[in-house]
Image: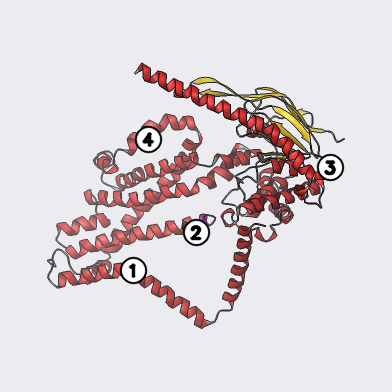
């Protein structure tokens, strides 16, 4: 047995004993662990807390005109007011509905398409030029076209989101299929895997991490495009809230709209990360 | 004497080399006139200089490619494609990183359509056989190289192939792990009675493991000579590496191989010279 294997054995043995001890850990130990976690979280958000404090202090000290940059507390108060009138709920639900439906439709349509294009090389060669052209046409540049063709209703906004999500999803899925280790395919073939089995049991799981990169990029792109299209023509939504507040000189509301976009973006990302962790428990942690 | 399991009859394999723009530029002969019998239950080691077509030979046996001419017979029938009657162990393990050790061992059975309960039982048996009983639920990245290769061996044995094909399986391991696994492989071979074709570039390994050692020539690959390993070196109890007989056989294989390595190097040198010449020509055109 090699020293490396010995080491692994030792580590595993040690690890097992530790989990055994954990089960019998006293409340005091658990408390200390919780406190340490809290301290770590505090250290990590130090910069954030400092920024918020500066946001609060700078306008109050008159360093920046409070009309253009109201203190953080005023922004939150404005948000509270918006929430009470129900306006916030309308805007958030409108934005969420558009972003989520566009994003999900795009994933459901484009990921399977990418898998097929990646798998059949000929199809990829055929579509390559078309994909390159579309990908390099910035979605926002097409916004007027979508509005002309589909009106200023939900259809044009959701189509914009679908379109902007499509390219990162498609390119990453195609790359994911192409990057599958040929040795794994060879190995599965020698064990008598049929093409369907090969696809389901090898290509798909091997491609998943790269597909997820595309999904993460697509979610960011969805928010960007959504806010822009809501700014151009909409009756509700956070983009509308931001631009309408600016026009009406309700600056705290405008900042709260921006804040809302950030929170939705973070929530989106957290959900995606959780899904990714669930599906990719087998992945080697990047630090290890 | 046991019946012939695998028979190579004047097998030849050519590859079309592609030049600029993917147009066929020429023909490259990887294997030429391979004629060889492997008996049922035999452990045959195959050594050759690098680039002699050892792995091509294994791909042919695995049914991943077809010979340009000649026949490869398994139990008297030509090989038509990959199948679970042959198991392949690769140098780079080729484990599926998203499957645990046990799930990796189950892969072939999964493909064959075995039920989950049965699969799990077989996987446990073969993980025991390779000495990894406590590691069933580990993912490949949590295992050392030696352990990964044990899983790969268990995976290939699990669907009960009659022939085990091994492509330099221990080449990426450190010396101690390699020796341990060589011993383990001999034990598994004796316990299961599989026919094993073992490809290696290490002479010691070939002499320690093989009942016969086939030495291949450099490009194009041919079988230069097949050496019978004396029974003294097949002893289970002794450290065969310390026997004088081991040194003698080892030297015999080494001498055969050295000529081929020199040939291969010369071939490469003349190739380089030719390439250099072409470059000069191109410059002259400019």
Which residue is identified by label 4? A131
Q: Which residues are magenta?
A: A277-285
Residue A284 belongs to magenta span: yes
At mark 4, the secondary structure is: helix
Q: Quadrant of residue B37?
A: top right
User: Eyeballing the image, is B67 above or below B101?
Assistant: above
Q: How does the figure colour the protein chain or chains? A: secondary structure
Q: Main secondary structure of the magenta part?
A: loop
Q: In this rendering, do the residues under marks 3 and 4 share a single chain?
A: no
Q: Chain of mark 2?
A: A
User: Eyeballing the image, is B213 above or below B114?
Assistant: above
Residue A204 belongs to magenta span: no
Q: Position of residue A130 (x, y in %)?
A: 36, 32
Q: Nearer the viewer, residue A273 or B199?
A: B199
User: Eyeballing the image, is B271 above or below A14?
Assistant: above
Quadrant (top left, top right, bottom left, bottom right) of the C terminus of chain B: top left
- Foreground label between 4 and 1: 1
CB atoms at circles 1 and 3 under 8 Å apart?
no
- Foreground label between 1 and 3: 3
Q: Position of residue B178 (x, y in %)?
A: 67, 50
In space, the residues marked 4 and 1 are separated at their CA atoms by 41 Å
């Amino acid at each position: 047995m090699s020293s490396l294997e010995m080491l692994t054995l030792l580590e595993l043995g040690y690890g097992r004993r530790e989990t055994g001890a954990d089960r019998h850990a006293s409340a005091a130990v658990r408390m200390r662990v919780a406190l340490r976690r809290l301290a770590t979280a505090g250290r990590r958000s130090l910069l954030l807390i400092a920024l918020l404090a500066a946001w609060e202090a700078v306008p109050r000290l008159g360093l920046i005109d409070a009309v253009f940059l109201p203190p953080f507390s005023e922004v939150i108060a404005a948000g509270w007011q918006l929430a009470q009138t129900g306006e916030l709920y309308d805007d958030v639900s409108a934005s969420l509905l558009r972003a989520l439906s566009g994003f999900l439709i795009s994933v459901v349509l484009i990921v399977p398409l990418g898998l097929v294009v990646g798998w059949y090389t000929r199809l990829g060669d055929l579509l390559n030029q078309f994909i390159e052209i579309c990908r390099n046409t910035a979605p926002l540049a097409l916004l007027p076209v979508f509005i002309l063709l589909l009106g200023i209703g939900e259809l044009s906004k959701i189509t914009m989101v679908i379109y902007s999500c499509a390219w990162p999803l498609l390119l990453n899925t195609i790359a994911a299929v192409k990057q599958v280790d040929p040795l794994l395919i060879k190995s599965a073939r020698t064990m008598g895997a049929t093409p369907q089995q090969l696809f389901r049991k090898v290509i798909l799981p091997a491609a998943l991490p790269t597909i997820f990169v595309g999904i993460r990029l697509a979610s960011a792109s969805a928010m960007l495009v959504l806010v822009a299209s809501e700014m151009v023509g909409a009756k509700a939504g956070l983009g509308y809230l931001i631009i309408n507040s600016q026009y009406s000189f309700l600056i705290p509301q405008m900042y709260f709209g921006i804040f809302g976009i950030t929170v939705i973006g973070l929530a989106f990302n957290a959900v995606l990360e959780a899904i990714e962790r669930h599906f990719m428990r087998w992945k080697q942690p990047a630090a290890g | 004497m046991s019946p012939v399991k695998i028979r190579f009859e004047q097998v030849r394999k050519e590859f079309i080399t592609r030049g600029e723009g993917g147009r066929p530029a020429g023909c490259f002969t990887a294997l030429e006139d391979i004629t060889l019998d492997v008996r049922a239950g035999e452990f045959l080691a195959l050594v050759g200089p690098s680039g002699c077509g050892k792995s091509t030979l294994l791909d042919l046996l695995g049914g991943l490619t077809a010979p340009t001419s000649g026949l490869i017979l398994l139990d008297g029938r030509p090989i038509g494609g990959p199948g679970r009657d042959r198991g392949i162990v690769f140098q780079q393990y080729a484990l599926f990183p998203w499957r645990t050790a046990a799930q990796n061992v189950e892969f072939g059975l999964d493909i064959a359509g075995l039920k989950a309960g049965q699969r799990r039982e077989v996987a446990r048996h073969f993980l025991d056989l390779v000495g990894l009983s406590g590691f069933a639920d580990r993912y490949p990245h949590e295992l050392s190289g030696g352990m990964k290769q044990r899983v790969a061996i268990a995976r290939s044995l699990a669907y009960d192939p009659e022939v085990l094909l091994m492509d330099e399986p221990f080449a990426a391991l450190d010396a101690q792990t390699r020796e341990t696994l060589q011993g383990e492989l001999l034990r598994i071979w004796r316990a299961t009675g599989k026919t094993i074709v073992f490809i290696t570039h290490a002479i010691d390994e070939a002499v320690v493991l093989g009942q016969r050692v086939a030495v291949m020539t450099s490009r194009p690959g041919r079988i230069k000579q097949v050496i019978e390993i004396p029974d003294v070196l097949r002893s289970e109890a002794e450290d065969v590496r310390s026997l004088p007989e081991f040194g003698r056989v080892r030297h015999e294989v080494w001498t055969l191989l050295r000529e081929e390595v020199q040939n291969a190097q010369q071939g490469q040198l003349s190739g380089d010279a030719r390439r250099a010449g072409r470059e000069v020509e191109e410059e002259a055109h400019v």
